[in-house]
Amino acid sequence: MKKCPSCGGENNDFNSFCEWCGGKLPESAEVKSEYVDGSNDSFNPNPNINSGMNTNYSSNYNSNTGRSNYYSAESDNAGIQALVFGILSIFCCSIIFGPLAIVKSNESDSTMAKAGRILGIIGLVLWVLGIILRVILR
């Protein structure tokens, strides 16, 4: 196991980045040479790829957020989508894009998702204020 110099978290030997903080892990010459010379032909750098599921829930599950500590492209895509929907909710169709931004932001912990949630809420508030002003000014 590799120990992260930044946070002290324990990581698998084949990891290049820390599972906990994302920091760069030091290279381990002993681990590299073991697999480079072919002495261990059964080495699988990602043992969960064949099984299709993560079996190491205890060390990678964050009980505070209820989400995995692994970075995933799906959560990043959800953050991007939340941000785009949030921006669209400001300029057009707030009643559609505002809720979409809020729902998509719940799928990701990224900063983009948080910004999308805020913009979605602002878009909905502006939509409600527009409806109220139309009723008052008639």
Image (spheres, rainbow, N blue to C red):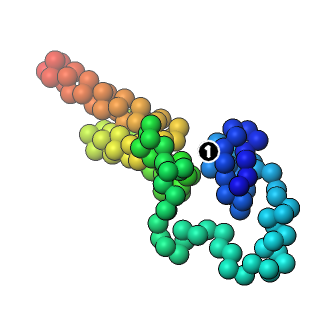
Q: Is residue 66 above or below residue 34?
A: above
Q: Where residue 12 appears, x then y in whole percent?
A: 67, 57
Q: Where residue 98 appears, x then y in whole percent?
A: 33, 39
Q: Judge whether residue 22 can be spotted in this image.
A: no
- Nearest the camera: 133 or 76? 76
Q: Is residue 72 above or below residue 136?
A: below
Left or right, 98 with respect to 31, comes to left
Q: Judge whether residue 59 can be spotted in this image.
A: yes
Q: Residue furthest top?
A: 136
- Nearest the camera: 134 or 87? 87
Left or right, 24 with respect to 130, comes to right
Left or right, 13 with respect to 136, comes to right
Q: Amino acid at mark 1?
A: Trp
- Nearest the camera: 77 or 125? 77
Can you tell which quarter of the image residue 90 is in?
A: top left
At horizontal 49% and vertical 62% (from top left) the residue drawn is 55
- Nearest the camera: 124 or 52? 52
* Number of numbered discs overlaid on the protein picture: 1
Q: Where residue 82 appears, x then y in whole percent?
A: 43, 45
At horizontal 30% and vertical 41% (from top left) the residue drawn is 99
| Mark 1 burial class by Cα count in 10 Å: few <14, some 14-19, many 20+ | some
Describe the element under mark 1 as helix, strand or loop. loop
Q: Which residue is mark 1?
A: 20
At horizontal 71% and vertical 55% (from top left) the residue drawn is 1
**Quadrant (top left, top right, bottom left, bottom right) of the C terminus:** top left
Q: Where residue 133 appears, x then y in whole percent?
A: 22, 21
